[in-house]
Image (cartoon, coloured by chain):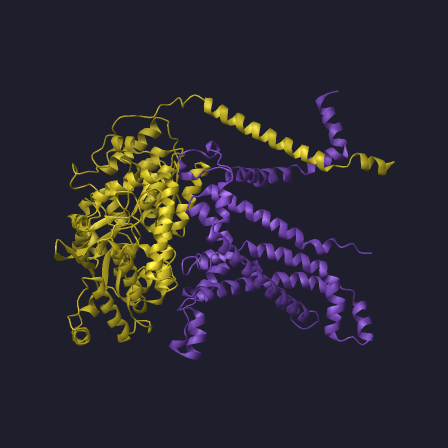
Chain colours: A yellow, B purple
Amino acid sequence: MSEQKETEEKVTRRGYMKYVGGIVVVAVVAAAGYGIYQATLPPPTKPSPTGPVSGATVSERAINGVKQLVDAGVVPKGATVKMLHVAGSKNNFEPFLADWEAKTGTKVELVTVGSEPDVYTKAMAEATAKTGEYDTVTVFSTWMGDVVEAGLAKDLDAYYARYNPEYGPQYPDNTPILPLADYTTMYKGKRYAVDLDADVFTLTYRKDLIENPDYAKEFKSKFGYDLKVPDTWEETKDVCQFFTELDLKAPDGEKVYGGYFYADPGWAAFTTWFCIFVSKGGIVFSPNDMKAMVNTQEGIDATQIMTDLVPYMHPDTLSMSWASLYARYCEGKAVLTMAWPSLIKWAQDPSTSKIVGKSGSALAPGAKVTVGGKEVLLKAAANVVNWVSIISNYSKYPEVAYAFWQWVTSPEIGAQSVSRVGIMDIFREVWFKPPYKETFEKAYTPEFLAVFKDCIAHSFPDLMIKGSSEYLDKLTKNVSAAYTKTKTPKQAMDDTAKEWDAITDRLGRDVQLAAWKSFIPLYPKDVQDVWKAKGYIS
Amino acid sequence: MSITDRLAQWMGKTESFKKLSTLPLSLVLNFVLIVPFAIMIYLSFTKWEPLAGYDWWRAPIAGIPRFIEAFADARLAWALIRTAIFVAVVLPLEFLLGLGMALLLLGDFRGKKAFTSIILYPMMMPWVVVGLGFYLMFQYFGPVNLLILRPVFGEGGMIDWFTDPVLAFAVIILADVWQWTPLMFLIIYAGLVAVPNRLVEAAEVLGASPSRILRTVRLPLIKPLVVIALIIRGLEAFKVFDIVYIMTGGGPGGNLTEVISLYVYKLAIVYNNTSYACAVSLIIMVAIALITRLAIRPLEVKVE
């Protein structure tokens, strides 16, 4: 009898599937119902304050604006804004969070991730999931096309109008450096980000070694010209070779190498290549049909130069992450290097450097190119992966998140934040002048500040069109394949061009072409002149 | 009859009780596995990526071009070949090493418990930690070169492990073997310990050598366990991601150590090519299901 009962009450496969299916249907219907209910809810009864926020300074307006929101009951006291950012910027922001809370009654919580590509993946995942997990994200300007097109970045035009962060030529003192601040924070004519950085590449070198008279004599006898900060990439190779073969020892007893230029397959390899390519007079896409032009002679030459430099660079160059350049240079294991401005802050800080006071700064090396039958020295410095902050479209408190950025990047607070060791770099005009100048000279050295202005004048934007992350990943992988000699420079560039064209076709050639064309006028005039001379642009 | 009476009656039935007991699992399965899986199947037939500018449920149906594209994708084919090589190398290595260690530890000796625990430690470590550890150990100025190769062979004997695709792949294999041999050891050891001693003793009395006892008594008895261990480990090895992502990111030479999980990750996350990533995932999932089905066949042999 009991056996019979067991058989009768057995859960059959069909019955169980019906039961499971029932749960799914009920849950889906419930979720849809909830969604419809949410959509039909009336807007919040407390209207958000509008109109310009009062305040004499950029930071004051940010504080006043949030106070207004709290007083109006639009934002509850103690509301928390979550910021997704990379570990390297923690020291720039964390010390200021308590002050922000004391002044506004709202909190900022840092969600720190270890590597830059992780920020991208989390940001894009949030763009799809739309959870509102992060109110704001610090992103590479390179990703602007992606984060805007994916719907994550909020249009900030209304906040800029309401809070007046003093961007633009009408604020010659306070504005972030132009045109960098405009093209890194705007997309298709709208403002989507707040500027945090000015990431123009600068050549950093061991002044004590380059200016050493004994080495100068030896160098001249070997290469037939004076040892100096290199003007061209060919000279760079000579200097790197010379110091590598000298077999000098770093403070820890390990070998000193001539150079350390980004060549790692992680993501940074494209940066150095880009500088060489543009200084050779290369243009990445045709302005006529968006055809990839990285496999032109300039692209092959740029790849060849880096391949030739490999034997004279620190071995970490090919396998370690970008931060290794900072570490090895500051340990005194490389003579020439090219990186973001923050490198000099690391090199000047006794807690992170063994070569304090021994660094010099210069404009990136260039190339001799012919324009109108005349040979000119073309130098170009990439403004690569400039940090900017976006506000999420799914944020609960987007205005608070925006106001925080305006406050922490303001001329007054930003001077303290950016001058700290961290990956944010000097990006406001006013910081090059008294009373801030002294703070920044201490952080970066007076020589650097003078040189950096020149670098900015020769700077060009990195790729900021839709799909940049994919374009640059393919470029990085191919150039690093050439550097490890698994591809020839021509093969690497041909493969890149083929892969880039496939991406362009997938994303829409016309859309991409329109975006690319808007960046061409942002290249320095001398670069554009070379492009004209070569017939690349009209 | 009141609602509470009906509920009590329903709860009183065995079938209802079983359904209620499995409710939490059903919910988890539905919303962590089945619903996302259904979305994945749907997306693989569409043309959608986050940069499309519209939500995924509005994506136009594209049919099967994504699948056709996958069969013509050389990078996918190479990633699959590399993954197959990886599985084909690590699986026998881990099995043989695990078996060897299990046989060594069969007998009793002083400190056996401590030794067994130490052997199991690598398995308890997160993949990411193992990947990072090996990545740092095999750097040019890492401990392997500085503490082993340089003292023995001099400066010229130092190896740039991660710039050579074969060496880089070898380091990845080494890391996996180091971490997962303990799992094989654990399963095989558990099986060997459970083999009745009287059978081994009987074989010994009949004059069988230790190797013959292993081949004809111990291994046949633990065969189902070994097959399960190989399937579990094989499936896990096929999914290898973390250590490759951390150590080489798929490089050097562009993508010369790229395995299938890493390629799918890049398609979906770095390149935002979501629909294609879904199509590729679906093809791989079907292929793995077929292979697994074939692999578990030996377990289905009826014992007479």
Instruction: Say how many tags the image has.
Output: 0
x then y, percent, for residue A114: 41, 52
- Please tell me which residue is depicted at 63% across the width and 32% down the height of the picture: A23
Residue B193 vs residue A23, the one in the foreground: A23
* Left or right of residue B35: residue A3: right
Which quadrant of the figure has residue A218? bottom left
Q: Is any part of residue A501 visible from this angle?
A: yes
Quadrant containing the C terminus of chain B is bottom right
Q: Is any part of residue A391 visible from this angle?
A: no
A123 vs A320: above or below: above
x then y, percent, for residue A45: 40, 21
* Left or right of residue A92: residue B303: right
Which quadrant of the figure has residue B218? bottom right
Which quadrant of the figure has residue A276? bottom left
x then y, percent, for residue A154: 35, 35
* Left or right of residue B187: residue A358: left
Query: Residue lying furthest right in this view?
Result: A1
x then y, percent, for residue A395: 40, 35
B245 vs B57: above or below: below
Quadrant containing the N terminus of chain B is top right
Residue B218 vs residue A286, the one in the foreground: A286
